[in-house]
Image (tube, rainbow, N blue to C red):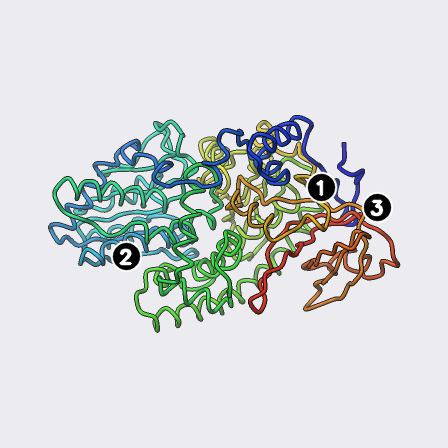
């Protein structure tokens, strides 16, 4: 049943509100806790019980942080790492080229620097070398180092790790493990097949952080001290959000604390990146995922693979500013390349049908650095798992993104085992793959079949999920601040979204390139400012501009707009329907 009777909005979406049971839970929670009804609606949707509300609104890292020794090989990994530090051995860090890999590498480099040690950073080129360790690189590193630490990669790299003769290898990863592990000193990974999955939601940087916690414990047992780890949580927060790790459990606390650290502007790389992105407010999880993360990623996507990691690890302000400027330029180039691929992929996916369990597209010459972003766009648009593949020389390299409740990484690994993919791996929400062009259709058909068995494609592509109704007068700064305490929001914990029923448009003006600025009223004197980005890309902008006094149901997310020291509530409008 649609919410407020909206079966097809101006954007063609059906509105879906909270169910009867969720409404009942929210009402009971409001009565028991005294919290605002709107906040309780969000908490009920997130599965929080009334007794858990105080702890949920103020997550304490010391209470939520798991014991690192709960992960297999953790003590061994930390002990070998500390041995290399103590003996002044030559250490190399082999990292993935994305934000999680760069943040993981920067964590280790920062920690080692504070201990008076340095490390060699190695990040493979996305196009020439591909994801993860490769034999030539590992042989080269092993010839000049005593210990190689692979971060955000390595769990499936049996042959390359075996090629690292003469050096010890430690793997700190979170990608889905196979039936066997590479022969090395330690593989610390919450997604090993012999783990219980309780920490499967951690990104690689969080795994690295836990190893550094274990290093601190072992140092204390030996009567020594390590660096301050709390000051490093900005990197963990960035990686957690940018890698689309679900913001549940300890991840919430890591991101919440990491945002507080980032607001202090102590890391030169993140300060420079925030400034070049013109970020003039304290960062939120939105900024990590959509402002900072894409810029860090830009180097690995279409430029030099190690720029992002070097920026995050930089301790020199001038170097950081130069690297940030370079990443910002690359990010602009990336957007242009992405738009061309997105248009082609969307047309192809639409021709195939956007209501299938899997939405996919493949094209000759599509840049491998942007296929993952385009897959994300298709996933968001259709509410289905999406895979986008760039073809070159009879082989395709692709990237996929999944929806909540559908494990894409496991299905991709199944296709590798069945011989339909040349390579592949990942985790629940994201995966990479390599496929022979001759096998492409068969592989995608089989992947769609496996994903359908997990429920992919059952949700309506056009459903807009709402937490409830508010009137303009109830949208206050105080309510926004209370809602923010239920965050951070992101993967696994979508931002609160409310409907504003039967409101009038008292002011509407196009601003910027296709955006719409609005003022809404309830007819009783209360008003609410709103902004709708990209409004004129569809019917929303023109309809609301030419409203002719008509009343509308409006839907979107509340945010605090800060301008010239003034804080006011603003609705980020996402959809509307005639009242």
* Viewer-closest of 395 and 494: 494
| Distance from the alpha carbon under mark 2 to that under mark 3 | 56 Å
| Residue to which mark 3 is pinned | 579
Looking at the rendered image, the disc whose residue lies closer to the viewer, 2 or 1, is: 1
Comes first in the chain, label 1 or label 3: 1
| Distance from the alpha carbon under mark 2 to that under mark 1 | 47 Å
Decide: is 426 above or below 238: above
State whether residue 405 appears in this view.
no
Residue 110 image label:
2
Q: Position of residue 258 (x, y in %)?
A: 40, 51
Looking at the rendered image, the disc whose residue lies closer to the viewer, 2 or 3, is: 3
Could you tell whether 528 is left or right of 86 in the image?
right
Give the quarter of the figure containing the N terminus: top right
Could you tell whether 104 is left or right of 545 in the image?
left
Decide: is 454 above or below 132: above
Residue count near mark 2 (Cα–Cα under 10 Å), binned few <14, some 14–19, many ≥20: many
């Amino acid at each position: 049943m649609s919410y407020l009777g909206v079966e097809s909005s101006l954007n063609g979406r059906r509105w879906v509100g909270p169910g009867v049971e969720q409404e009942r839970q929210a009402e009971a929670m409001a009565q028991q806790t005294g919290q605002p009804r709107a906040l309780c609606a969000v908490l009920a949707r997130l599965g929080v019980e009334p007794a858990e509300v105080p702890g949920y609104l103020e997550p304490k890292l010391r209470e939520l942080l798991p014991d690192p020794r709960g992960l297999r090989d953790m003590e061994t990994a930390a002990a070998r790492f500390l041995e290399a530090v103590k003996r002044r051995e030559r250490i190399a860090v082999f990292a993935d080229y994305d934000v999680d890999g760069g943040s993981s590498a920067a964590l280790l480099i920062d920690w080692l620097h504070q201990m008076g040690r340095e490390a060699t950073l190695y990040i493979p080129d996305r196009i020439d070398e591909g994801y993860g360790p490769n034999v030539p690189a590992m042989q080269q590193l092993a010839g000049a180092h005593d210990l190689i630490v692979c971060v955000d990669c390595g769990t499936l790299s049996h042959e390359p790790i075996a090629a690292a003769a003469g050096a010890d290898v430690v793997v700190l990863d979170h990608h889905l493990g196979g039936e066997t592990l590479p022969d090395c000193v330690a593989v610390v990974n919450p997604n090993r097949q012999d783990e219980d999955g309780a920490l499967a939601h951690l990104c690689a940087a969080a795994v690295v952080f836990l190893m550094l916690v274990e290093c601190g414990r072992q140092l204390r047992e030996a009567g020594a001290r390590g660096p301050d780890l709390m000051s490093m949580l900005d990197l963990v927060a960035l990686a957690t959000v940018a890698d689309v790790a679900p913001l549940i459990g300890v991840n919430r606390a890591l991101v919440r604390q990491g945002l507080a650290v980032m607001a202090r502007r102590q890391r030169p790389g993140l300060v420079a990146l925030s400034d070049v992105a013109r970020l003039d407010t304290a960062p939120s999880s939105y900024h990590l995922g959509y402002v900072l993360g894409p810029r860090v990623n830009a180097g690995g996507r279409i430029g030099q693979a190690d720029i992002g990691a070097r920026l995050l690890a930089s301790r020199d302000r001038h170097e950081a500013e130069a690297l940030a400027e370079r990443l910002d330029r690359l990010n602009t180039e990336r957007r242009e390349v992405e738009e061309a691929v997105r248009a082609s992929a969307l047309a192809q996916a639409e021709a195939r049908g956007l209501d299938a369990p899997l939405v996919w597209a493949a094209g000759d010459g599509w840049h491998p650095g942007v296929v993952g972003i385009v897959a994300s766009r298709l996933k968001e648009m259709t509410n289905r798992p999406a895979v986008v593949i760039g073809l070159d020389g009879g082989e395709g390299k692709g990237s996929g993104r999944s929806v909540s409740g559908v494990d894409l990484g496991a299905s991709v690994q199944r296709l590798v085992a069945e011989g339909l993919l040349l390579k592949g791996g990942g985790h629940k929400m994201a995966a990479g793959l390599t496929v022979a062009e001759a096998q492409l259709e068969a592989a995608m058909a089989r992947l769609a079949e496996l994903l359908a068995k997990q429920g992919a494609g059952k949700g309506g592509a056009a459903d807009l999920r709402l937490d409830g109704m508010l009137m303009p007068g109830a949208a206050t700064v105080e309510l926004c601040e209370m809602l923010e305490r239920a965050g951070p929001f992101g993967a696994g914990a979508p931002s609160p979204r409310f409907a504003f029923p039967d409101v009038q448009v008292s002011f509407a003006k196009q601003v910027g390139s296709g955006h719409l600025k609005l003022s809404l009223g309830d007819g009783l004197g209360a008003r609410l400012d709103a902004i709708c980005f990209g409004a004129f890309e569809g019917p929303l902008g023109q309809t609301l501009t030419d409203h002719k006094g008509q009343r509308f149901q409006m839907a979107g997310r509340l945010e605090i707009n800060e301008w010239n020291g003034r804080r006011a509530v603003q609705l980020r409008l996402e959809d509307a329907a005639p009242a």
